[in-house]
Image: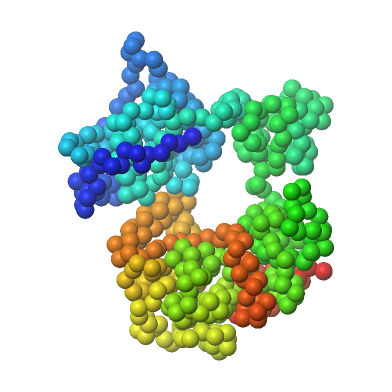
Amino acid sequence: MPTDVDAGRSGLELGDGWTRRWAVSWRAGGDDASCSVHDLVQEPVLTSDPMRHFTWRRDKRHRPGLQFLTSTGRHHGAESLEESRVLLTLDFAGDVVDVISQPLRISFATCGKRRSHTPDYLAVTRHGVWLIDVRPEPLIKESDRESFAAAAEVAVACGWRYAVAARWREHAFAGLDAMASRRRLSSDPLGLRPVLLGEAGGGRRFGELAAATGCEPVARAQLLHLLWSRQLGVDLAGPLQDRSRRLRGIGGFPQILGCDVSGEITAVGPGVSELQPGDAVFGAKSPSVRGTYAQYCLVKAAEVIRKPPELSFAEAAALPYAFLSAWAALTDAGFRAESAAGRRIFLQGGSGGTGVVTLQVCKALGAHVAVTAGPQGVDLCRRLGADEVFDYRTEDFSRHLDQFDFAICLADQSEEAKMISILRRGPGTGYATIVHPLMSLVDTKGLLRGGSEADRTFLRNRRAQKRRHRAYAWSLFRPDRAALELLAELTEKGTVQAVIDRTYPLSATAEAHEYSESGRAKGKIVIEID
């Protein structure tokens, strides 16, 4: 479990230009190198050598050792049992590409003196870079908290993440250690793995799965390997034992797509009282491999509400996911329903599936709304109530708009600078996008470099807008029951309507996606299930 690092931040000198005053040194090819924190992201520190070798003296209560990581295929140094545990955890959960021990030394300024700190690990994963310190919580001193805070600031400046591993949840490491004992189990001569995976549905228990094979000792070893490789899942909050339940992992195929849902409830789980079998509902579930393109789907009670009788099932299914994605962006930018009247909002991409519902909701709440649309969507946006509509092919909205409160990107992130240029200076203003630069960066530069660059880009842009007292966000869909209820209320009043471009049967799902990818849809594409 990580520990809070903010406690030591008050002692750091973090005035203007601190990234140029703080220095970082590392070793590469046997030579020492150094630069300011400001320039660190341009340096090859992710391939550096350890700053120092591990040592041990008789008076030390720990000793150095080596931990083999299956993800990197080699041993990595650890100065203590706690560090060895962190390495094992990274191997299990971190999608590790490489781990560098004692990667760099940070020279930082505090109130009255200059200090240095060497973090324990730099972990390069497929999802980004982590700078990590390891210190048992009872041994953390006030000076350590200051060092941790300094390391956290350096990590943020570089677009990395930072954590201090200070304590373990009860049972967590014991379970992890048990799984690690079989992590190198490469063969399956009896062919038990497919059998175990096939029998694992329905939350069966560990002992039951092993016994069902007729070869229990070997099956236990294979189960531990499947858990380690995350083909099966387990709750590490409790002890790993025969009574522990197993769940199928989230990866693999087949995968069922779809997030929007509208239909009748056939059954409810224990504790669900607001909804009953037979209720007509609509909503959106979080993205998963068990989606809504199916005759039956499983949703959380908080993800759906009763369908307004004014809406057909197809109309209801056309609204929630698009709206909640855009609503997340609006709220991240600072928009609030209770103060929406009179606010000036720009929506880039007003005629798409997300734009048409967002435009109507903003107008229903009393906002002044300007949008862009293609030639075929201009009239649609005007009919839906847009105050200003610009044909993006022939008009530059940034030449006509100014002093807007919010700008929301729903279509083309390349126009971010233009969208931000029409905003007034804050506070109470903001920009947000649901079209993430992260995806294009990963596509062009790979998961590691692209993800790291995306982190740096986001933090740099957010800092730039913070200086102008504006919010800045890259937003994602998130469940929001209150927003869903607002949407239902507005549809009941008739101020928001579903705009459906085309409807396809479930058997034509591939055609529906091809049409969606063409970019020609004006409104939503709905898949109807008989």
Asked whether residue 414 appears in the rendered view, the answer is no
Q: Position of residue 176 (x, y in %)?
A: 58, 29
In this rendering, would 158 be left or right of 303?
Answer: left
326 horizontally vs 196: left or right: left
Q: Position of residue 203 (x, y in %)?
A: 75, 39
Relative to residue 415, is residue 354 drawn left or right? right
Residue 266 appears anywhere in the view: yes
How many numbered callouts?
0
Looking at the image, which residue sits at the far front? 338
Q: Residue at x 72, y 76 (%)?
A: 311
Q: Is residue 281 above or below residue 56?
A: below
Coloring basis for residues: rainbow
Q: Please tell me in which quadrant of the rendered image residue 129 appears.
A: top left
* Of the pair 228 and 110, the residue shown nearer to us: 110
Q: Position of residue 511 (x, y in %)?
A: 69, 71
Which residue corresponds to the image point at 39% horizontal and 77% vertical from the top-left?
404
Q: Quadrant of residue 282?
A: bottom right
Establish if 150 lies above or below 268: above
